Amino acid sequence: MNRIFCIAARDFLATVATKGFIIGLLITPAMIAAFTLVGPRLFGARTFKVEGDIAVVDPTGVVLPQLKAALDPQGAAARRTEEFRRALSRAPESVRKMAETSADQAMTNLLGPAPDVGLVEHPPDADLDQVKMWLRDDTEGRRRLAVVVIHRDAVNPAANSSYGAYDLYVPPRLDNRAADYIYQRVREAIVNARIASQGLNPKLIEAIAEVRRPNSITITRGEETQTVGGFNFLLPIAFTMLMFIGLMTGGQGMLTSMIEEKSSRVVEVLLSAVSPMQLMAGKLIAYMAISLLGMGIYILMGLALLSSFSLLGVFDPWLILYLFIFFIIGFLVVGSLMMAVGAAVNELSEAQSLQMPLILILITPWFLWPHISNSPNSMLSIAVSHAPPINTFGMLLRMASTQPPATWEVWLSIAIGIVSVFAALWAAAKIFRIGLLMYGKPPNFATLIRWVRAA
Amino acid sequence: MEAAIQLSGVTKTFGKVTAVDRLDLTVPRGAMYGFIGPNGAGKSTSIRMIMSILFPDSGELSVLGHRSALDAKDRIGYLPEERGVYKKMRVSAFLMYIARLKGLHDAGLRTRISEALERVGLDGVERKRCDELSKGMSQKVQLIAAIIHKPDLLILDEPFSGLDPVSMRTLRDLILEENRRGATILFSTHVMPQAEEICDHVVMIHKGRKVLDDDVREIRRQYDPRVVQLEPLDAGMDPSKLPALPEIERVEQVDHRFRILLREGADPQAVMRRLLETIPAARIELARPRLEDVFVRLVGGTS
């Protein structure tokens, strides 16, 4: 046992004490932080501003005043404040508090800068070709965004006819966000003109039509907390990603280390001191500890983030326990097979063809994730959550879904996982023992199967 | 006394190739055994089976009284033919790691490593990374790794390959020292003069089968080549000036020397006396049989 831990300690320290490991460990959270903080600035999502003029030809004479009101900076500001308030009402309390301390900045972050759109009025009988020419002549000052020609029957239709609308002329490459803004404001102006022409109060109609979305409350055993939209959606993918990263980094590290030891011929020196099984066990423990260390750091970072937003209460701590159980099962299966591949080949390039099927199997749950999340109790979801080696991913996705499986199903999957661990270790040990001292032509699958079947 | 290594009828095949064929071998404790044969003869496979790195298809073996070397690994030192080190590891860390795997405790280990490195002229390399060492230095470090735990049995597979004469001498002295300490040594090589130089006993293997297993002196006695080597004072002497003795079967000239092959039953001492009476000689000697010659004689044209 001491020898196993001696091997494990060497491999663990030889990996975690390298700059590569530390950089690799930090690079994922750094990339997430970079995308969150720098991404929007880089992509310009927050800095886009709808700015320019719209030419309007209004034969009805009643839409234009409404459009002026819709584009009025004060009205626009009130509308943005209301929009921001609604968006914020669905956010966690800590986020609300944070946003309220710097509301203007938060609003700009969420909705972008306030639009600045002016109107160029044309008489009802204006020559349309001349007006269109204005759109083409974009040489001076502000951007010319559109020409809006309101239909004569847009507000008061002829008898037995439906309402007319408007024609829109735009320059090439008009930004979608600017086009959306124009659609919304012209629509608002026409609707308000129609309501007014019927002698109705537009404010009253708006009040009648609005039903505010409630702040849903999640009831847990201990307390009631505000429901956080998207949490149930994000949790499974976060867990699956954590496990996938853990398995791939650990498995890949083990494969590389094995190939390195074999190609540098140090393996036979080791085999003079320990048995192949001790060597394999030591390496499995080392790389499992390395993966657990990485995963543990990510989990702690995630929990710290949740805690800072007062969201720890919505998180089921049992899921972490199950994550670790499934991770250990998954690691022992995938890791032992990866190590067997590493022992069987001479170079990393030779390992690619042998490990490819394993990687393809491992990424299958990623393709099935939307289905499992939406239909966790479908036949396919149940099958995936019990079929090794992907049962660990499948069951974790089901457990984090809105309709988690029964506890006995979880433990059945764990039991199947444990059996698959023994099967994988048994097969890997055979390949490992034979492959370690095999040099020359790399084995194919048929050879590996023959080694497994050999006594 | 129980043998250090005992093999009886050990066979190992790889696919259709029989690497080791019904090999019997007994290495007594404290002996210095040479395990010789050409490349591909089955030496490394036999050694790997002794080390329980490979397992025989049939036959029995015991190592230091155990049926498997796995049960006695702490008492065995092994320098494999295909050897290596962790390139990024420092020399002292590598040796400490191997020593721990061999069951040594940390107390006094650093001192022991320093002394061993000093013994082979590598003092001061403890902090160097293994990939900074030359091949000879690396090989010395590996031999230290094999003997750091003072094993009862030391198995060395081609220990001198690729070494310069000075490093070879250092390693040879270290091996002989280990033998004097009481370690049994099984030393494998395809360079037969090396075995001839340091071993008491050799086992010759060819195509997986043992062709010779005897004491070196006994081999020399048995395989006396009946060759007298003569170097005349007159470097340009004509071979016809050699006396026509009935004991001489054939004369070969190699540069300015003569290899004189005697007939079966001839007395070499008498022939040498007669030759010296006729030819003024710078040197005359009875050629010692070389293991290479013995090997060629034993396996004939099959080698």
Image (cartoon, coloured by chain):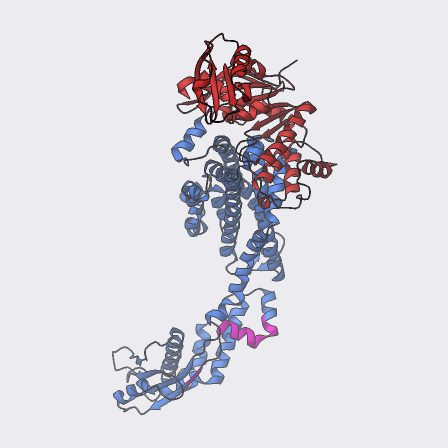
Can you say whether B174 is above or below A320 in the image?
above
Name the colour assigned to chain B in the rendering: red
Q: Residue furthest right?
A: B107
Is residue A307 within the magenta segment? no
Q: Which stretch is magenta?
A: A99-117
Considering depth in this image, is B259 or A217 the residue closer to the camera? B259
Can you say whether A142 is above or below A108 in the image?
below
State the blue chain. A
Horizontal arrangement in the rendering, residue A193 relative to residue B41 (left or right): left
Is residue A107 within the magenta segment? yes
Horizontal arrangement in the rendering, residue A393 relative to residue B88 (left or right): left
Measured from the top left, where is residue B199 in percent x and y?
Answer: 59, 22
Q: Is residue A227 visible?
A: no
Q: Quarter-wise, where is residue A281 in the image?
A: top right
Can you say whether A425 is above or below A369 in the image?
above
Measured from the top left, where is residue A149 in percent x and y?
Answer: 30, 84
Can you say whether A190 is above or below B139 in the image?
below
Task: Kindly identify the residue that appears in the image at 57 percent across and 36 percent down.
Answer: B164
Horizontal arrangement in the rendering, residue A97 relative to residue B82 (left or right): right
Dominant secondary structure, magenta: helix
Q: Residue furthest top?
A: B265
Horizontal arrangement in the rendering, residue B181 relative to residue B226 (left or right): right
Measured from the top left, where is residue B200 in percent x and y?
Answer: 60, 19
Q: How many marks?
A: 0
Q: Quarter-wise, where is residue B61 in the image?
A: top right
Task: Kindly identify the residue that appears in the image at 64 percent across and 42 percent down.
Answer: B91
Considering depth in this image, is B251 or B152 the residue closer to the camera? B251
Quadrant for the N terminus of chain A, please: top right
Measured from the top left, where is residue B171 in percent x and y?
Answer: 62, 32
Considering depth in this image, is A20 or A315 the residue closer to the camera? A20
Q: Is residue A300 visible?
A: yes
